[in-house]
Image (cartoon, helix red, strand yellow):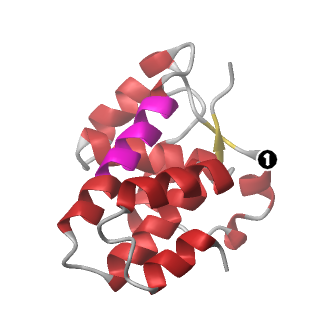
Amino acid sequence: MSSVQSEVENGRASSGWPEAIQARLKEAGTWPTLNWLFDERTRQPGDIELKGYVEILRAVVVKEFLSHPQGMRAVPKLSPEFLADFGRFNLTAQEGYLISLIDGRTNIEKLLKLSPFDPFSTLFNLARLQSQKAIVVPQ
């Protein structure tokens, strides 16, 4: 068990979220930290500070996703891993819908227009699909 986990389990991290999150980011990276925060949010649904940090990290993920050299004109494609064994991917309904829109010709800007979800959620889910290696965004 990491020191961050023990802090949370002992109830000390609720007032020390910045330090715990920073330590986790250095230790594990963005996506593992975000998944950890999602788990903590489930355990501590009333912690407004925690909810805020989740949203900050989600914004960081979207910003990183959009930092692609082509930005909104980038064209996501289904990855070979996804095409070979899509059953191993545990997609949410939103992610599944977005996968159905990806044809290898439609850029992110157009996907945002086609998606029935709000732009931020669409971008976050595309970033999540990329992190899971279900899609690739070629240079």
Q: Identify which amino acid the numbered label 1 is placed on.
A: Pro
The vertical placement of 88 against 137, above or below, is below
What's the magenta region? 55-65
Question: Residue drawn at (30%, 81%), measured in percent from left and top?
Answer: 44
Question: Residue drawn at (38%, 48%), measured in percent from left and top?
Answer: 58
Q: Quadrant of the C terminus?
A: top right
Where is residue 81? Give x, y as percent. 78, 53
Q: Inspect this view and state whether residue 110 appears.
A: yes
Task: Please name the predominant secondary structure of the magenta segment in the image.
Answer: helix
Question: Residue drawn at (37%, 25%), measured in percent from left and top?
Answer: 109
The vertical placement of 84 against 93, above or below, is above
**Residue at mark 1:** 80
Where is residue 92? Give x, y as percent. 45, 68
User: Position of 85 compared to 106: left or right?
Assistant: right
Look at the numbered disc 1 and give the secondary structure of its residue: helix
The vertical placement of 104 against 21, above or below, is above
